[in-house]
Image (spheres, helix red, strand yellow):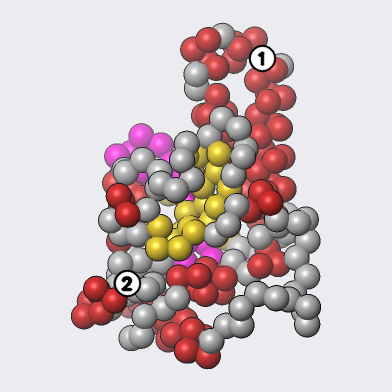
Amino acid sequence: MDTVSAEHFLLDQIPMARRPSIPTTLRTAYAAADVVIAGEPILQIESARDNRGRIVQWAVDFAFKRLIDTEEWPFAYRWRSFAKPTGRYLEIRFSHSAMSISQVADARKQPRDVVFRGNARLNNEPFFDLPEFADEREVRGLPHFLLVHGYQELSFAHLGVPHSQHRRGYIYRTPNLMWMPHEIVVGPGDDRPAIEDTDIDATMTLKDEIEKWRRDHDE
């Protein structure tokens, strides 16, 4: 199987027209978290302020769940257990991939290296612009993306294809989605680089391989 462009596969799974919903949904979630905190004295003591991120996390999960429930996003989701059964996280399911959402302090770095994220990013290893794995190209699971967003303040949001080696960050990461316009019009005036035929062919081949893996593993 040919190497697949991580940028093109991400675009195939989350088209440009769907991406303006991301900053809008995040802004709504952060605002909702602030309202909840402001209205509850228990959440205003110092120890609670230090854990504001948890309220934001729950608000973000709720906002993206609602985005899908209302069919504004034509995708699916499910709740997955952490490797140690201490809780669950939201996994968003696209046609041939999956995504989790995390707060990070540094947009250039992957979230904290925990087991479920480590297992997920290994699915990216044989593909996506990584010629060093050319002899190991076999689908092991759904390719995994990350949506990372600003920790205390919503200053950034990025979609990324994480590298299988945590310290190496991302194979590909979008520009800051918080700078996107509310709507994206793709047409004759679109000045983004054209997608190469080889990118399209490689992506379609990978999708065929993923479909075969799903049939074999009842996914």
Where is residue 146 shown, x and y percent of the image? 47, 54
Q: Where is 5 relative to 26, above or below?
A: below
Is residue 103 positioned above or below 139 on the image?
above
Give the secondary structure at mark 2: loop
On the image, the x and y values in percent for residue 60 come to 60, 40
Q: What stretch is highlighted in magenta?
A: 81-101
What label does residue 40 carry, if any? 1
Disc sitting over residue 130 in the figure: 2
Res. 68 image quadrant: bottom right
Residue situated in front as seen by the camera: 79 or 92: 92
Amino acid under disc 2: Leu
Q: How far apart are marks 2 and 1 (CA)?
A: 49 Å
Q: Position of residue 67 (x, y in %)?
A: 68, 52
Q: Which residue is drawn at 70% across and 67% down?
A: 17
Answer above or below: position of 194 versus 83.
below
Locate residue 14 relative to residue 21 in the image: left or right. left
Q: Magenta stretch: residue 219 in it?
A: no
Residue plotted at (56% across, 74% down): 12
Decide: marks 2, 1 in contact (CB < 8 A)? no
Q: Residues within 10 Å of mark 2 (few under 14, many from 20)?
A: some
Determine which of the numbered discs, if any, sits on residue 156 in the image. Answer: none
Residue type at mark 1: give it: Glu
Residue 125 can be seen in this image: yes
User: Can residue 95 be seen by looking at this rendering?
Assistant: no
Q: Quadrant of the N terminus?
A: bottom left
Q: Does the magenta stretch include residue 95?
A: yes
Pointer 2 or 1: first along the chain: 1
Front-most of residues 71 and 198: 198
Q: Is mark 1 on a helix, strand or loop?
A: loop
Name which residue lies at 29% across and 39% down: 84
